[in-house]
Amino acid sequence: MSKILTARFSKFDQYSNPVFITTPGHPEETDSYNILKKYHQKLVDKEYDTFLPIYHSEEYEYSTIRLKKSLKYTKMKPGNVYEIRFNIKTVAKNSKIYVNCFLEKCRLIKKAPVVNEGEDLDLDLDD
């Protein structure tokens, strides 16, 4: 069954898997943060001894979801807020159970604010 979240795109990891982040400090992400927090706890309670694609940090108050890479969704920009539809599936391999999240749809909700990086500073040693 598909699940829907509103989350900020964080980055593509070293395997080109998209990673999304949610925090309670962003009003449009609060519900998704709480959902991912609950999903993470449910996965932890099942005691899988493999990597979990949903993570929650109580200390730093954020949750992330790592989705399997998709050839269809490769142009997401860090900081943009997206509505994502995904599935969570398990597969048994080599007597272990692996949990994977698969991206079904991704829709841009809000673009990231432009960051003012300031002006270039000329520090020539010729003076």
Image: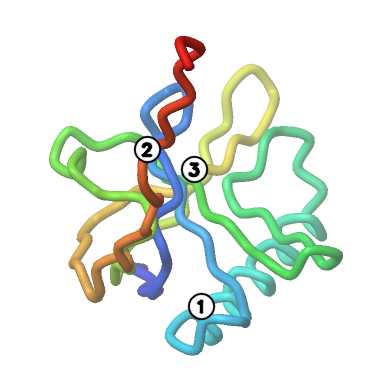
Residue 14 to residue 109: above or below: above
Q: State which tag comes first along the sequence, 3 or 1.
A: 1
Mark 2 lies on residue: 120
What residue do we see at 13% from left, 41% from top? Answer: 72
Residue 78 to residue 120: above or below: below
- Label number found at residue 42: none
Residue 66: image x %, image y %?
A: 49, 46
Residue 107: image x %, image y %?
A: 18, 67
- Name the mark nearer the viewer: 1 or 2: 2
State how far apart marks 1 and 2 are (Cα): 39 Å
Mark 3 lies on residue: 100
Left or right side of 52 for 14? left
**Disc 1 residue type (three-letter):** Ser
Q: State which tag comes first along the sequence, 1 or 2.
A: 1
**Disc 3 residue type (three-letter):** Asn
- Name the mark nearer the viewer: 2 or 3: 2
Disc 3 is placed on an element classified as strand
What residue do we see at 20% from left, 60% from top? Answer: 105
Residue 104 lies in quadrant: bottom left
Residue 36 lies in quadrant: bottom right
State how far apart marks 3 and 1 are (Cα): 18 Å
Residue nearest the viewer, comparing 85 with 27:
27
Mark 1 lies on residue: 32
Residue nearest the viewer, comparing 111 with 21:
111
Residue nearest the viewer, comparing 120 with 22:
120
Disc 2 is placed on an element classified as loop
